[in-house]
Every structure is written in C-alpha cells, then in structure tokens.
Amino acid sequence: MNRQILCTAAALLMIAPLVTRAQNPSTLFIQNATILTVTHGNIEHGSILIRDGKIAAVGSDLKAPDGATMIDATGQFVMPGIIDCHSHIAIDGSVNEAGPAVSSMANIADVLNPDDIDIYRDLAGGVTSANILHGSANPIGGQTVVIKLRWGKPASELPFQGALPGIKFALGENPKHSNFPTPPGVTPRYPGTRLGVEEVIRQAFIEAREYKKQWDDYNQRKSAGEQNLIPPRRDVHLDPLVEVMEGKRYVHAHCYRADEILMLIRVANEFGFKVRTFQHVLEGYKIADEIAASGAGGSTFSDWWAYKMEAFDAIPYNAALMADRGVIVSVNSDDAQEARQLNQEAAKSMKFGGLSANDALKLITLNPAIQLGIDARAGSIDVGKDADLAIYNHDPLSVYAVVQKTLIDGQVYFDRQRDIAERATLAAEKQSLLDKERKAAEAQKAEEKKPDDNSEKKPDKKSSQKKKPPQAASFTGNASASENAATGVAGGAR
Amino acid sequence: MYVRSRRLNSLLLVAVCAAALVGWVCTARGEGGEPRYFAIKNARIVTVSGAVIENGTVVIAKGLIESVGTNVTVPAEAWVIDGTGLTVYPGLIDAGTNLGLTQDDDAKKRGAGPAASGPEDRPGTSPWRVAADELKTDDKRIESWRNAGFTTALAVPEGGILPGQATVIDLAGERAGDYVVRPRAAVPVSFKPVGGFFGFPDSLMGTIGYVRQVLDDTAWYAQAEPIYQANPTKTERIPYDRTEYILNRALQNNEIVLLPANNTIQILRALRLADEWKIRAVLYGGQQGYEVASALVASKIPVLVSLKWPERAKDGDPEAEQTLRELRFRDRAPGTPAALAKGGVKFGLYSGGLATPKDIFKNLKKATDAGLPQDAALRALTLDAADILGLSDRLGSIAPGKIANLTITDGDIFNEKTRVKHVFVDGRWFVIHEEAPPEKPGEKKSGDDDDGASAAHSQQVEGVGR
C-alpha cells in the first residue's frame, strides 16, 4: 500500500537550500529548556553546551561561555533528533531496481538526492537522521545508507560517517509481486511464492559463499607466489552479500508474517550472518522471543494494518509487546509525510501497550540509533554525542507539539521563525521569475506572429514533440526527465 | 555547377577572374575538378590560438591551412578571395549532435531488446557500433549547420546505456568516409534506465551499478586476456565478450568517456564516478554548472554544455506548480558558460537537439547576455571543443597545419545581423547564399519541408571556369 500523501500546501514553496544553510558557530548554548535526555531523565530549566558540533555539557547549572551563540528555549522542550529507521526520501530516480530478484548491485549511496524537499520537510518534523532504503520489490534489494538530513549540503556530505552500510531484503507479497499483476505478454518474474523468496535468498548466499571462496583461494595462491593467475571476476551484486557474511553490512529485512520472519532467521543462521533489523515486522509480537534471541531489532509502524492480506494480523500493541520481550524496537515512517510526525507515532505506544513516556521517546531516538549502530554518536542527549537535537514548543509526545528548531552537528538546519520570515521573500522571488518567464514568452509569441518571418512560423516536428525540462543530459534532447522519474511499480510500498 | 548569375557576388567574380588568369586551374580541374589552393586576402583573421590579424591572408593548400599572416606568400595556383570587409574564423564545432545519424525509430529501438535479467545480458549495450559506420550524408541538417558556420560536429549515437562510439565529423564530403575526422572519438554513456517493465535495469541506481559492473568486467578482461594468451596450455580459456573486448580497446586508446550530468546532483555524482572508475571523463549537459563551478574547476574534468536551455514545458499544464528551484534553474542555466569560463573550466558547447542553427545562435546569445565573454564563447565553439575531443592539433584554430575549416563572415560572428559568406570544410569551398524572400503565407514551398530546413543555401564551388 502506497501512502504517498502529497502535501500541496507544502509544495507551494520549495525552499532552496541556500537560504536555510546553517551558520557554523563553534559554540552554542541552549538555555532554560526542558531537556529530555532519554538516557538519564528529564532536566527542567536545563542547558546544553555545544562545542564543535558535539554536546559538551548538559545540566541545570551550566553557565554560558563568552561568545557562545545563545538559543533561548524558555518553555520549550529539547529532545534528541529523531532517527527514522525506514525512509525512502532523498533518492534520485526509482526507489526500486525491480528488474532482477537480487538487485544488490544497486546502491542508494550512488543516487542520493540532496535537493529532495522531503529532507527539509522531515527536518521540520524533528528528524535528523534516516536510514535510506531501497524498496521492497526484491527478495534481496539494493544497498542502503544512513544519512543525516544536512539540507543544503551536497550528496557526498549526507551519509552518517561511520555508520555501517546496509542492504534491503524483502519477504512476502512485495517481492513475489502479489499486488502488482504482471501485464499480458510479460513473463512473470520468479519468485512467485514465499517458498521462492526463501530459495532466491539462499541461492544468492550460496553464490556469495562460492564467490568468497574463489577470492580467498586466489589471494592465498597469489600471496604464495604463484604466477600467471587469472583473478576471479569482481561481481558487484555478490560483493555486498560477502560483506553481510563478514559482518560489515547490516541486513534490513522488510517482513510481515511470523512464519517468514522465522524463515529468514534460519537462513541467516545457515550462512552465518545476523539480520540487523526486521522492518515493519507486523506479526513480530507473535514471535518476539525468537526475534530477541536472534539479536535482531524490530522497526515497526505505530498503528497501520489490514491494508493487504499479510497485514491483517497487525496490532497497534506490536511495538510495546516486542519491547516487553526484550526486542530493541523502533517506530519508523516508511513515508516522507509520516516522518514529520514520528513524535506522535511514538506517543501512540503509550496508549497501545502502556509504554512510559521515556520508552516511547526511545522508539524514535535511542532504539533506532542502536539498530543502525550509531548509538555512540546519536539517539540521546549525552556529553560527547553529536549535537543532533529537536526543539519543540510543547512536550514532543503531545499533539500540540510543533518543532521550533532542528540542529545537526550543532548547526541549525531548520528554524521555524526563520522559515516563516523567509516565506515572503521567496514568494516574491518566485513571482518575479514567473513574471520574467511570462514576459519572455509573450515577447517570443509577438516575434513569431510577425507576418514577414515565415521560416519561424513553419511548424517544426521536433518542437511539437512533448517537451520536458531537460533535467537529464542528452545529445538530442530525447532523454527527458524520465531519467529521474520513478519507474518501479512497487516503489517504497509497505 | 549551378550558380544563379544574379547571386554571383563581386567576390566570386574576383575569384573567377583570378582563377581564369591562372593556368593551374585547368590542371586542378583535370585532376578531379576541385580547386585545392586558396588564398583569402585582406581579411580580418580571428585565429583563436593567437592574436587577431587585421588585413591578413590565409592560404589553404590541399585541405590544410598552409600559412596565415600579413606577409605570406600566395601560391601562384591559388584561387584568391578578396576578404576586404570579411572576418575569417576557425570553423565552428558542435560538440554533440546526432547529425548524420538515423533518428527516431532506429535509435530508440537500440538497446530495447528483450528484458534483461542482469548485467550478464548486457542490456542497452552496443559499444561496437561506431557513428562513422552509420553516417547518413543525406541528412539535410548537415548543410544547414554548415551554412551557419559549423564545419565540425561530434556525432553521438543514442539509445541504450552504452549505445556506441561517437565520431568527429567534418560537415562536407563526397562520401561518408570523407566526413570522418576521428571515427572512435568518444564512448557516450547514458544513465537512462532501459529495463522497462521488470527488465534490468529499470532504475537510475541499477543503471549506475550496471555500468560499474561492465567497467569491472572490462578491467578483468584487460588483466586476464594477456595472461591467457601467454599461457594457453596452462590456463582455462576465457570467454569472448564483445562488450569487454571493444570497451577495453577504447579505454586503452584513451578515448574520452562522456558521462551525463546536467543538474547539480548529476554533475557532482558524475565527478565522483569518474574518479572511482578511473576513466578519462568528459561531462555532458552541464546546465546547472553555475552552482558547482568550483567543484568542476577542482576536478579538471571538461564539460560539454548543452545549448538547449531548459524551458517550461510548452504543452504542460498551465496550472502546474512551478517550484522555485525549477524557476531558478530555467533562469540561470544560460549563465553556466559564463560561470565555467570565469572559473577556468574547459568547456565546449553543443546543440543538444536544437532543431536549427538559428536556435543555436539564439541560445548562444542568451549565454553571452548572461556574461559569457565573446572570446570565451568562440574558444568554446572552436579550440576548446577541439582540445576536449583530443583534436586540437588539427582543429579549432587558424594556424599552419590545421585542417582548413574556416567560417568567413561579413562581420562579428556574435552580431545577429552578421551573415556567413563562405565556409571551408577540409579546404572545400562553399559560397553561402541568402535565402530567397519568403513566399506568400500559406503557400508551401516545394521540397523544403525537412527538419532543420536551412535559411540559406550553399553551393560548393568546383570547376567554376567550366
């Protein structure tokens, strides 16, 4: 089910990176806030000292150093920046490489789109980091990357440095294309059953194991001094699977049903790797002990269910029940719009399952940080961690809470007041550009109407063809924006 | 030959008279009809590689520029063109077109074979196809480009991820082979997915992954093949793969690889990939280069900038929301050449699908209006383009030894009122005539309904004395 909701109001004004680029103060002091540290309780009238992008001190009796940039947060709440463990924002082109059933040669890191407006919108929802995943069209999908939402920075500066890369797996209806009927004349793709999904994953790892052996043999013989050896071919789709077996790459597995989750745990055991997170994991509550024992985390929705057959047994108590049994649980968005209210999604687990406020906050901060292996750097307000923070006007678990500022590495990347102040300027710029274009078009029309200029008037086959803005480079203007268009049918589907 | 006498201008008469007085013409004609020696005298010569020469002479001999300057010896056999009031430029280079290549259906079909299931099926990959082998010299646009002063073009095959190899052509010749300056000049790459429904690759990231695999395979072949050939009795035979074989040869020959990169994201990505893939990359598109000129400067990677500036879709929904980012892009794109010139990025310019040379000059004017100095624009259209294509030893400027590609105008080439009067391509002389006045509106001109119909027509001069 695709829950892409277009927020037209927000689309009216696409805010360009330049104007929101954060300044770079080396010392920042947030004072008089209610600080939700997540790891060591809440601090009333507290302050946070930030130096060089890191949290240098937290407490209620701090004094601002001279020259520090001050943020007065009187009456406001500071929480760790939200971490979205399942996101498809900031991707240039299709979210799925849906051709082959194993698309591990596709790498999200190659196609990060720093201009995606959803980065800015998610910042406005307090999100500071996100796990950018390939879609769920294939049993083994593409390589994934954790980013910080550094709006305005180039793609190369988005990745969360030091975070292990991941790979997307998918079980159930999406990889077997249940909900996307194959059109007539197209051979249905294998696999078409859950059995087939398991077989595809096993087969890929059998190949990867053999591939690794070939390379190990080659390297051994080479270092033994053997001459004239032809190396194995490098295989870009098996390399990441070898990394999975070597523990250098996390598996994030899209799944719903208990049986398929248990299946993947068995397959992982067979090949000696661990699943890092089960994503969606809507029936996780049924097998929470097994998931906990496998060492995997669970990243689920708050209260979405019944949107397809395999989601019928989902319940909103899932997060709380799994957490009860010792699973590290996060609540994710899987959706650019929902990512803007993850605070409320987390709060739902207080009603459904009775989590404490602090445990609810963990679902979107410390727990996803643990799942992504970045908890030494993010997920709580502790000295030494990155100053990735969200400042709300109310308790973030309240429906009245609105983000005022979002900081990453101690830099303000979203500031509600600044955003509001800039709207008129940007709207005026936009209007003047529109006017300029209209005038140019009118001038051209007038020129074309001149009766003495026959050659201009002649209908031209090329120009009457459908023209799109040439976002993509081309030598003949034929390659249009389609290079960037999403083509995957199962794009980002749950 | 056919020259309407009323159109014979005085220059031509001078040339004819000069020719008639020299017995050599008969010999030249006797050897094949075409005169091979020319001298353009008393002209303003914009050499591009050196200073502008006032009242200078360019001597052309057998397709090459023999000498240029104010004090040069004109061979007795040369046809003399009085260049008084004329300006001589190096022939212009369109650094990316499909001139001379089959358009529409064939190109589209290329690479659209049965759905591939993985890289091993080599989807959209035919690097063995060379534009030189597929040239259609009856492409009417060749003449219209030439009449506008373009003497050279990079003909780029399209359709697929690795559709073939691009050819540098001069825009004149009797048969296709005469046009070809360098048949295997560049390997164009497209990241446009070709997979269609459930075929590989159907995403941008899959396409990039695919190109990475193909380059890895090629590198493997380059390493494995010599080992096998040296040890055929001790090593298992390696399978033959046409793509690996051809690409290896192209890369060994140091051919440039053209990477698509129009907007900022694509440009920065292409710079990263060029670095990772260790290829001699040239970016094409480049229209948002104004945002990332410094990164391009640092990379030292040249850019071919498309002159087909982004426009609002003409048949688009008039109510469709325009983002500020798109509006800014459309407004600022023509400022890219200026930004690149200022930063010192080497760049060429290409028509990129513009239908007529008139459109090229119209869009070029947008670039100069946006701050591109005219001398930089001229370099981009001549010597810098030649340099990027690895042919600056023979194209792009007026200097002894260069191919005799010249564009001779009655004024500054960037002035809208200026007309091209003569064009030399490989020492072949074309006199450019003005178009006849337009016929009555509604009255269709016969035989002139092709794409890119020229606003001028040319007549190659051969055996004028006949």
Image (cartoon, coloured by chain):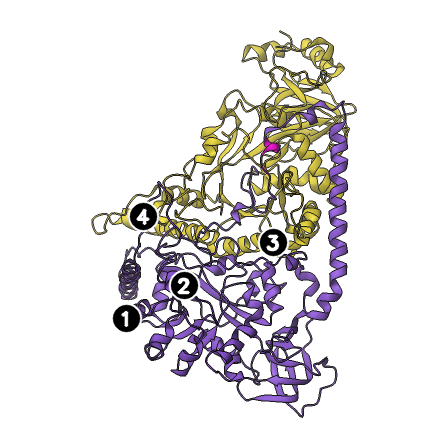
Chain colours: A purple, B yellow
Determine the chain carrying the residue at label 4: B
Q: A449 left or right of A216?
A: right
Q: Name the amino acid, label 1.
A: Arg
Say left or right for A486 vs B52. Answer: left
Name the residue located 63 percent from the left edge and 24 percent from the top edge: B453
Q: CA distance from mark 2 to mark 3?
A: 28 Å
Question: Which of the pair B16/B295 is nearer the observer?
Answer: B295
According to the image, label 4 marks what residue? Answer: B225
B168 relative position to B8: left or right: left
Find the distance from the CA under tag 2 to the CA under tag 4: 36 Å
Which mark is on residue B264? Answer: 3
Answer yes or no: are tags 2 and 3 on the same subunit: no
Q: Are marks 4 and 1 on the same chain?
A: no
Specify the label residue A266 is tagged with. Answer: 1
Placement of B117 over or under A361, stated as above or below: above
Which segment is the magenta one? A462-467
Q: For residue A23, which quarter of the picture? A: bottom right
- Magenta region includes residue A466: yes
